[in-house]
Amino acid sequence: MRFVLFSLALVVGASSARAAIHREALWVVLQSCVVAQNTAGIPFPCLAVNLASNSAPGYAVLRAPFSATRVLVVPTEKVEGLESPILQRPEASAYWQAALGARHFVTDALGGRIPLSEIALAINSSVGRSQDQLHIHLDCLKPAVRSALQQHASAFTARWTPLKVPLEGARYFGLKVGASQAEGFYPIVSLARLPGPRNLHATSLAVISAPANDPRGGFYILAYRGRRSPVEKLLDPTCSEASRSAAR
């Protein structure tokens, strides 16, 4: 167990320390969660484990080390990352639905001071991640990113479009999914329609709920293609909006 906890401490650490992190540490932690769930009925050290069945793949939810709010959703089968062909299967959309359903772990940690719509989801590219097991990051959205999206909401359409406004210093492709299409939408499959050559190894993805003032509702989908993976910069590990809410 001490080895498992040590591995957990290594998982998805700061990007500047990527080279020092064992890229299978998350997989080791995940296996311990599955064993604990199978043998004792508890998910420790994960927050939750949903075991695979004949009808749906399994996944686990765990809190990122050294973070009060960052949550990860991880398949219980071996899936290296966004580029994995496994994620193109229809049943793999269960991972995305699990991530949407796990947003409450973030808001619960904040005492419900912000709504689920302020929780963003992000997946790093292979060049930007520290672990070779797919993990969907869930955390608060930076207020500056929310403000930029509100100001440029009209730039998002039903087709992937290069956004003219940078978000945290990076230029993204944007896609809008309205509320009526959101329930069955699976953003990873939509990456196949990105303009230009298909290279999922160099693609990162973020999904953000539309703000309350957007009558269309749904989600903003962001994709970045390049030699870095800036999507985590869209997230706010301090959850400053929740802090402001508590102060009011």
Image: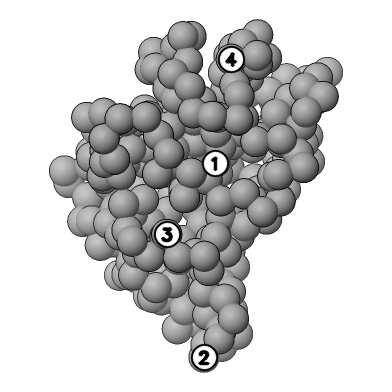
Label 3, label 2: how far apart the Cα atoms are: 32 Å
Outermost residue to the bottom: 39
Q: Disc 3 designates what residue? A: 88
What secondary structure is marked by label 2? helix
| Residue drawn at the location 65% of the way across and 16% of the way down | 153
Q: Earlier in the sequence, mark 3 or mark 4?
A: 3
The reply, left or right, for residue 118 in relation to residue 224 is right
Where does label 4 land, which residue? 155
- Label 2 packing within 10 angstroms: few (<14), some (14-19), many (20+): few
**Left/right of residue 87 with respect to residue 71 in the rendered view:** left
Which residue was labeled with disc 2?
A: 39
Q: Name the spot of residue 134 as percent of width and height, x first.
A: 38, 56
Q: Secondary structure at mark 4?
A: helix
The kind of residue tagged 2 is Thr
Q: Which circle, 1 or 2, is nearer the viewer? A: 1
- In the picture, the disc for residue 121 is 1
